[in-house]
Amino acid sequence: MKPLVVKKLSAVPGMRLSDIAERLNAETTENRVACVNWPAFPECPQISFRIGHAGDELWLAFSVRESRVLGQQTRVHGDVHMDSCVEFFITFDNAAYYNLEMNCIGTPHLGYGPGRANRRHVPLPLMQSLEIETSLGREPFAERVGDVTWTLTARVPVACFAFDALTDLSGRTARANAYKCNSGASVKHYVTWRPVHTPAPDYHRMEFFGDIRFE
């Protein structure tokens, strides 16, 4: 499969997350997150993401339509995967990877390491520079059942990839996968962008990441 090309977009001073969302919607390709890999969890919400970069920033925009939504985790580096959560995992060297997880009320978790165990959290002062905006706001809420749609936009400075010597994404190659989950919901789902061939849901598997290339 061809690498996903991450378009380079120009940033302007004072650019808001809503401006970034508009740029991504207008100038990048929609990527569906639609692989249902585990028969025990057949539910497949409608999920897509768009991705771009501005050299020193990674831009992400997710769009979700699901039958139940949950948003309770408010602690940075908390268990946001228990909520309605979108995720982007990326490795720059195939030796260790970052797991960026963001729930539907914009709470982030960002770790680093070679595998699921012994993850290192990105320091909190750097996490304060990571900007997230969702259409559901910031207030926590219990599970809502029904036809729910929501969006999330994130601006991730390259400094947040704190365990790599990165200053500019331009021209770099990497490998990544994108996910949706809701491990604390009454009906759980685990959906991926690139297929994951494991017996049970496991997002921490670099061998199933897809190739990406930054313009």
Image: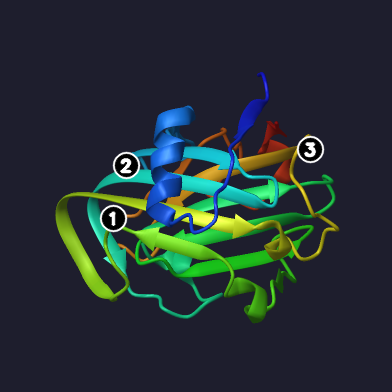
Residue 30 visible in this rendered orientation of the protein: no
Q: Quadrant of the N terminus?
A: top right
Q: Residue at x 72, y 44 (%)?
A: 206
- Occupied quadrant, residue 161: bottom right
- Occupied quadrant, residue 125: bottom right
Q: Kindly identify which residue carries mark 1.
A: 187
Q: Is residue 145 left or right of residue 76?
A: left
Q: Kindly identify which residue carries mark 2.
A: 43
Q: Are marks 1 and 3 in contact (CB under 8 Å)?
A: no
Amino acid type of the residue that numbered disc 2 sits on in the rendered structure: Glu
Amino acid type of the residue that numbered disc 3 sits on in the rendered structure: Arg
From what the image shows, is residue 176 above or below residue 161?
above
Residue 138 location (% of width, % of height): 32, 72
The type of colouring in the image is: rainbow
Amino acid type of the residue that numbered disc 1 sits on in the rendered structure: Val
Q: Are marks 1 and 2 in contact (CB under 8 Å)?
A: yes
Q: Residues within 10 Å of mark 3 (few under 14, many from 20)?
A: few
Earlier residue among tags 1 and 2 = 2
Earlier residue among tags 1 and 3 = 3
Which is more foreground, mark 2 or mark 3? 3
Q: Kindly identify which residue carries mark 3.
A: 172
Q: Residue at x 77, y 48 (%)?
A: 168
Real-space Cα separation, disc 1 to disc 3, in angstroms: 39 Å
Secondary structure of the residue carrying tag 1 is loop
Secondary structure of the residue carrying tag 3 is loop
Earlier residue among tags 2 and 3 = 2
Nearer-the-camera pick, 2 or 95: 2
